[in-house]
Amino acid sequence: MERTVRVALQEVGLSMLSAWLEQQEGSSVENSITCRCGGMAEYQRKREAVLLTSLGKVHYKRAYYLCPACHKGTFPLDERLGLRPGEMSAELESLLGVVGALMPFGKGTELFERLALVKASPQSADKATEAMGGEVMRVEEEWKAASRDAEAVNAQERVGKIGPRLYGSLDAVKYHDREKRSEEDEGWRDLKVGVWFETDAKPPSKPDEDWDIRARNITYYCDILEAEKFGDLVWATGFQRKALQAVEIVFLGDGADWVWNLVSEHYPWAVQIVDWFHATEHLGTVAKAAYSDSAEQKAWLSKVKEHLWAGSVDEVVKALEALAAEGKGGGEPAKAVAYFKKHRQRMDYAAFRAKGYQIGSGTVESGCKQMGIQRMKIPGAIWSTEGSRRTAKARAAFLSGQWDTLASRREHLPRAA
């Protein structure tokens, strides 16, 4: 009974949309109108059009004019309302875009048909998702232009440090690209992911406590670019988040050089913190390489983690050098020594915790999981570079709560867009 009622309501809705569209033109039409070329386009007849909407296919008739000077036809009603006959309506595009951003196109359209009682192809979901991703790219170009405007930057700086503490984090996740760059290329590419967020949560007092960052006001962004070009987006998104007004900026990341190079270039005044879990993973690798007995592994690891938690990086380095001198662990202790010496200033965890800073980069890792693993790396997925880029950006926008704004922009694009 419910399904019957839903189908009936859908039929009523289609009739209402059709009637409403034809009503917008009125009962009478002008004999001629001014053409874009400056000539006069003459009325020909009423022509039928079909719109693909969230209720199904809507049929309606509207006036068609033809200009004898430029031989181009026009439909004033379509232009006035921003309609794109034969294509998806803005609402349908938005809904299918969400489906494609969150799920594989095939399974997503199957679910959409069950929920909306409207059949859509996987190709339509792909097209809608990439269209929304393209809109994200246009927005980002606007952000980049604004962030390069010296007057705008100075204006933000003049306001002063009135904003909250702002956290930033960068990471990358692999996805499979079908576009090979060489015969040896297996197609794995880096999707670089960034995030801005705020939190009032306090760091844990012990390393084995439950960690709950409770991030809020999260903005995700991503792209498939070399680090230098990705830096433009790191700066532009920060400018949009009013980073220059933040009382403090704290960046979290792993040991990747590209991360800290970008942070140092664009936000040299920011506090830099190596993620606690990445640091301890290095120690865990050394423990497994140096000791075959699990109890010895655990005892050594527990001791050096205590030193690290207290911010005593020198003690950690001494412990690693001692293993290297004894010939334990192969080359792992020496590798770890170089890592901890390099990031010494980014591992003063006792001081960071005393100031209330978060020391875990779980928010960006969640973004990598949600954008990369849960969407880009689903079993069997092999992407085109542009398709993956647009889909990832669409998903980032949805996760950041920007979808309705993007859909509104798309709704008001010209017919040819």
Image: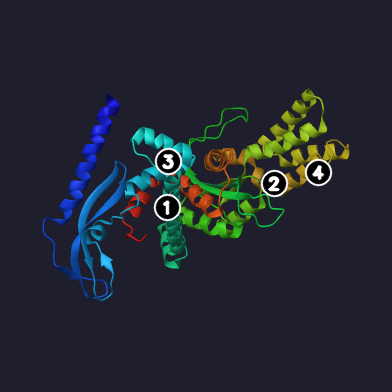
Residue designated by label 3:
99
Q: Mark 2 or mark 1: which comes first in sequence?
A: 1
Distance between mark 1 and mark 4 Cα atoms: 49 Å
Distance between mark 2 and mark 1 Cα atoms: 45 Å
Residue lying at the far right of the rendered structure: 326
Query: Mark 3 falls on what kind of element?
Result: helix
Task: Say few, some or many: other residues with alpha carbon within 10 Å of mark 4 (under 14 / 14 to 19 / 20 or more).
Answer: some
Distance between mark 4 and mark 2 Cα atoms: 15 Å
- For image coordinates 13% across by 56% down, the residue present is 26
Query: Mark 1 falls on what kind of element?
Result: helix
What type is the residue that disc 3 sits on? Val
Count of picture labels: 4
Q: Position of residue 207 (x, y in %)?
A: 63, 31
- For image coordinates 47% across by 36% down, the residue present is 107
Query: Mark 4 falls on what kind of element?
Result: helix
Residue designated by label 4:
334
Residue designated by label 2:
344
- For image coordinates 19% across by 65% down, the residue present is 44
User: In which quadrant of the rendered image does the N terminus lie?
Assistant: top left
Q: Position of residue 252 (x, y in %)?
A: 58, 45
Q: Are marks 4 and 2 in contact (CB under 8 Å)?
A: no
Q: Nearer the viewer, residue 227 or 295?
A: 227
